[in-house]
Image: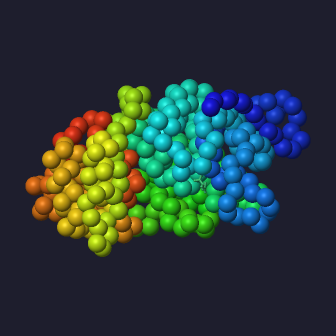
Amino acid sequence: MKAHSSSNVSQGARPVADEAKHHADLPRIAVLGTGGTIASSGGSATQLHDYDVTATVGEVLSAVPQLGEIATISSEQVLNIPSHDIDNAMLLNIARRVNAALDDPGIDGVVITHGTDTLEETAYFLNLVIKSNKPVVVVGAMRPASALSADGPLNLYNAVLVATSPAARDKGVLVLLNDRIVAARNAAKRHTTGTDAFRAAEYGTLGEVSAGVVRFLCAPLLLHTTATDFSAGQIDDLPLVDIIYDHQSARTHFYQSAIAAGARGIVLAGTGNGSLSTAARAGAREALEHGVRVVRASRVGDGTVTPLSEDEALQTIAANSLNPQKARILLMLALTKTSDFRAIQRYFDTC
Ligand code: ASP
């Protein structure tokens, strides 16, 4: 799906000539819509769960006329679905559309409206494959547009504000919800329903939007955007990588099933520090025999998965501080470049 429109909704009684000059001076932001709760509505103002995507990105934007005071907005509908239905082909398409918008010399920054369920996966993917230093901000909402105290309109306004900020350049892809600016690499959905669902926990927020002012306190140090080896334009499709969740009494059939399905990689959502249970160790051995790369991540939620002495023999890769769903994103990209486990480990150490 693709549709373009351009608008600058202005409020107030400025003379026409001043108005035109004012608009010409405003930063130009492209807003790409993909769906999610920010574009959803329920049957009543108190129906906060169980609703459908109903609005186009144009309709989401027109609910926030104040945007016209801070930016000249163009919009494009890339998808309009809940984010739990986004697949690899859609992910690549989003990345290509973002790169195309950023390549336009008339665009100063990009905002992507997105469902929150898999927002962290898309944001991290974009962080690795976008080739621009211009601001890119991914935004969503935890309450539908029809809800009492819907959070989408202010989140969208703040996301556009961040995208217009010179301080947001060179920071990699950013996630904005609940006034917090979080690096895409570290942002994770940590609450099923709360408006403060996105956090970077251990690794902190980069900044905030308070009283209409964008304030950055930190900058990401790991490789992102123009500094990575990956580019959406050079990838036709992404390899199959599955995630296997470990637990007491686990068995090996999921590993066998992933291998039989043609997976080129497996991310283990392991216990603790990416520990290898008896089943996980057997699964990793079987994967190695079939040339399938295994990354050890953790189901814990915070902290770094550190190397194990067994990694060398099993050719397993430690996920660093990436959660399993983000480790899947990086492993897919790494496998487009190499299947050497040491080279893949270097990507996990640096991206
Ligand atoms: N199910 C929704 C989605 O990810 C949730 C949300 O947007 O908050 O699209």
Residue 296, given in percent of the width and then of the height, sits at 26, 58
Left-right relation of 281 to 114: left
Q: Nearer the viewer, residue 290 or 219?
A: 290
Q: Quadrant of ligand 1?
A: bottom right
Left-right relation of 319 to 289: right
User: Which residue is situated farthest in the left direction here?
Assistant: 313
Q: Nearer the viewer, residue 102 or 149?
A: 149
Residue 22, given in percent of the width and then of the height, sits at 76, 35
Residue 103, given in percent of the width and then of the height, sits at 51, 27
**Residue at position x 69%, y 52% from top?**
52
Q: Is residue 225 above or below residue 6?
A: below
Q: Nearer the viewer, residue 252 or 90?
A: 252
Does any portion of residue 94 appear in the rendered image? yes
Does any portion of residue 320 appear in the rendered image? no
Q: Nearer the viewer, residue 78 or 70?
A: 78
Q: Quadrant of residue 21?
A: top right
Count of residue discs: 0
**Residue at position x 62%, y 31% from top?**
1
**Residue at position x 82%, y 33% from top?**
18
**Residue at position x 80%, y 61% from top?**
44
Chosen colour scheme? rainbow
Residue 94, given in percent of the width and then of the height, sits at 52, 37
Left-right relation of 60 to 111: right
User: Which residue is situated farthest in the bottom direction here?
Assistant: 248
